[in-house]
Amino acid sequence: MKLSFHGADESVTGSCHLIECAGKRVLVDCGLYQGGRELDEENAGPFGFDPGAIDFLLLTHAHLDHCGRIPLLVERGFRGEIIATAATRELARLVMLDAAHLHEEDAERRQRHLSRRGSKEAVAPLYTMLDALNALDRFGRTAVYDQRIELASGIHATFTDAGHILGSASIYLELEEEGRRRTVAFSGDLGNAGRPLLRAPRPPPKCDVAVMETTYGDRRHRPIQNSVEELYSAITDTFSRGGNVIIPTFALERAQELLYYLREGVSIGRLPRTMQVFLDSPMAISATRIFERHPECFDAEVRELFREGGDPFALPGLHFVRTAEQSMAINRLVGGAVIMAGSGMCTGGRVRHHLEHNLWRHEASVVFVGFAARGTLGRSIIDGASQVRLFGQDVQVRAAVHTINGFSAHADRAELAAWHAAVRPEMTCLVHGELEVMRQFKVLLTDTRVEIPVLDQVMDL
Ligand code: ZN
């Protein structure tokens, strides 16, 4: 029995872990590395195992850094079964097709650039739409929370609610090989219990080995209500200065959560009814529709709202912006608008246009409501850059920059420690975090052996 680590080791993105047991190979997640050009090359690099030899892929949730290399895995020979919850499957479809589209566009752009300079070099996308469609064909059984699935003789998997995004799961594996039994719990990404929409994470049973995320293992989130208040103030202050509020947002979860809070803000009179809100992201719009199809994933309060025929994501001045023309038309608005656009880390997508048009204005605001990895444009702005590069030109940062961390879809230090205390492992492997953060979190874990694996490290279970 072996456990090996092939991504999100001493770093946050690219989650990928491999279990070998009873002659079978089970992968947990196959995520994309995000943040900068070197990481693009890492994505195209070898997986560290033979994709054709993998029997099962268990997917914890649909974020790109957990599912974004699946099309490449299939292109390189994976023919096994992918198992995920119903909501994850629908969201992963959206995420992988969108990623394939962006990779194709990016390759075309780089090709044009090289050809113009007279280079004969051929640029291929990391993967294509066709690869993503082939990956969709690999989805097999649907995981239901708390129901045990037999993968093969001696290998059982149970998905439990991770409370992180719609459909997200921790995965508990029961392994048996030649009479020896081991249990391994993969946390996946763990949610933050105080948020609306989703239920709190539900830890798997006690396990021998835990593989856990540590994104915010060094900090304590402020109560969500403070963050909501901060958001409302950022919006009303910006409107009184006559500017727009740009919210770089992840299309999944965060966008829907913001719609939920903006709707609340209008209904309690804290935000103006005349406020114009643009959800400028076809992907976030599609994701919102998927959310509306999965009331089973929500907490009791939101399920009740759905039952009464309400829509937690509908507010008066909301505009869904699908086309590029509509998106560009927003650039003409100089004030009074809340513009939510991807990508959350500002690495691509329509938010870059909105930043180009607003970042240099004193009256505007940029509100970050999520994590931005090192090396991304989002992170530079958060870290106080006075000038950034957008579309080949320097843009001054004069807008007010707000970083509101309480919206995090990730558990904080105390919540991670509580999850760990619930699964009580003999050995804990820390993944999905920056190294200093892991070291700080490690000191909390006293009655367990703690490992911080490096890329491609193999452990005997
Ligand atoms: Zn995630």
Image: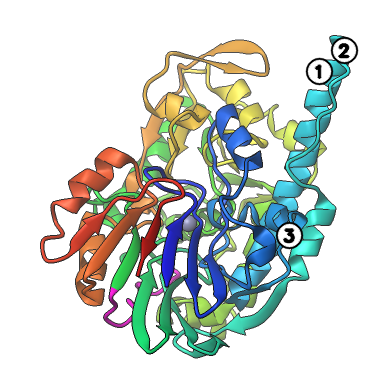
Q: Name the magenta segment's main secondary structure.
A: loop
- Element at badge 2? helix
Q: Which mark is residue 113?
A: 1
- Element at badge 3? helix
Q: Is residue 195 above or below residue 179?
A: above
Q: Is residue 157 above or below residue 227?
A: below
Is residue 348 at all visible to an observer of this figure? yes
* Quadrant including the N terminus: bottom left
Q: Which mark is residue 74?
A: 3
Q: CA distance from mark 2 to mark 3?
A: 33 Å
Q: Which mark is residue 238?
A: none
Mark sitting earlier along the chain (3/1) = 3
Q: Which residue is mark 2?
A: 116
Q: Amino acid at mark 2?
A: Arg
Give the residues drawn in magenta, as a range: 197-208
Front residue of this view, candidates 174 and 195: 174
Give yes or no for residue 174 being in the magenta stretch. no
